[in-house]
Amino acid sequence: MWQSLFGKNAERDNTIFEKLKECSLPRHTAIIMDGNGRWAKLRGLIRTAGHTAGVDTLRNIIKTAVDLKLEALTVYAFSTENWKRPAPEVDFLMTLFYDYLKKEISEMKRDNVRLRFLGRIDELAPRLCQLAHEAVDELKDNTGLTLSVAMNYGGQDELLRAVQKIAAAKKENDREITLEDIEKNLDTAGLPPVDLVIRTSGDLRLSNFLIWQTAYAEFWATEKNWPDFAPEDFAQALYDFSHRERRFGGVEAVKC
Ligand code: IPE
Ligand code: IPE
Ligand code: MG
């Protein structure tokens, strides 16, 4: 299904941002920022050079989301499975996250971005964990884009933690556990369900990202690696989303 969407990028229209003005945008977009390593390999560089380049893309995409007045953007920065990577790459990524966050807080404050983290943040290095908490606190009164960064995040781990919290609070003879109980105990509590998932660099899988929240999400994929993903590509994904018909299990098509 995702494969058939690849062709769309070839027909990119430069007026895509103009066209987007007429469209209804997703409330919640989630991005799997993949392909940094492949981007670097194609250029004869080491993998970590791809991560450095990917940071610039992230900054541009957040800026675009702010300009478009999107309500919620969630980005997958580091999965619970990414610890399997060689230690020097993991260390590099952690330092990159720290430096990026430190540098971007004031810009995000200016842009009215509210920040949250998904995942086991408290198990990251203490200085990164502390900075993450400080950044959330610093930006908590903002009212624009809600940016969620999934870091040390796994969808299965998130569900497990939610179930554990519910079980710990449950008393005998309590009412049955509801869908709402689960949602309230996820890291994404309070965020709208994901409308659109974007994945770069051609792989067609969720890789343990937001497995609950994407139940009725639309998928959009591109073969471009994350460092090459431009604001126009992002706009194209949003534009294509606005032309999808969603059915949510019913027979009536719901225009996005
Ligand atoms: C995504 O790029 C960044 C992270 C997972 C942190 P990759 O590092 O997975 O790049 P590829 O998929 O190996 O090309
Ligand atoms: C998903 O990418 C995780 C992030 C983008 C942070 P991966 O590169 O880890 O996914 P797999 O291993 O190819 O499924
Ligand atoms: Mg990858």
Image (cartoon, grey):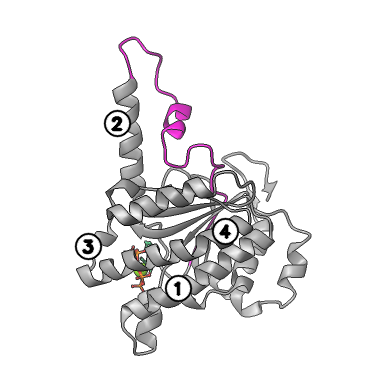
Marking on residue 188: none
Which kind of residue does numbered mark 1 sit on?
Gly
Q: Is residue 201 visible?
A: no
Q: Which residue was labeled with disc 4? A: 108
What residue span does the magenta drawing correspond to? 170-199
For mark 1, does the 10 Å Cα neighbourhood hold few (<14), some (14 to 19), or many (20 or more) residues?
many
The quarter of the displayed image where residue 64 is located: bottom right
The image shows residue 57, relative to residue 173, as above or below, that is below
Residue 195 magenta-highlighted: yes
Residue 205 magenta-highlighted: no
Mark 3 to mark 4 CA distance (whole Å):
31 Å
Contact between marks 4 and 2 (CB within 8 A): the answer is: no
Report whether 207 appears left or right of 233. left
Instruction: Provide residue 174's location: percent of width, then percent of height.
Output: 37, 13
Marking on residue 54: 1
Q: Which residue was labeled with disc 2? A: 164
Which kind of residue does numbered mark 4 sit on?
Met
Q: Secondary structure at mark 2?
A: helix
For mark 4, does the 10 Å Cα neighbourhood hold few (<14), some (14 to 19), or many (20 or more) residues?
many
Mark 1 to mark 3 CA distance (whole Å):
20 Å
Which kind of residue does numbered mark 2 sit on?
Gln
Q: Main secondary structure of the magenta part?
A: loop
Q: Secondary structure at mark 4?
A: helix
Which residue sits at x=29%, y=52%?
126
Mark 2 to mark 1 CA distance (whole Å):
35 Å
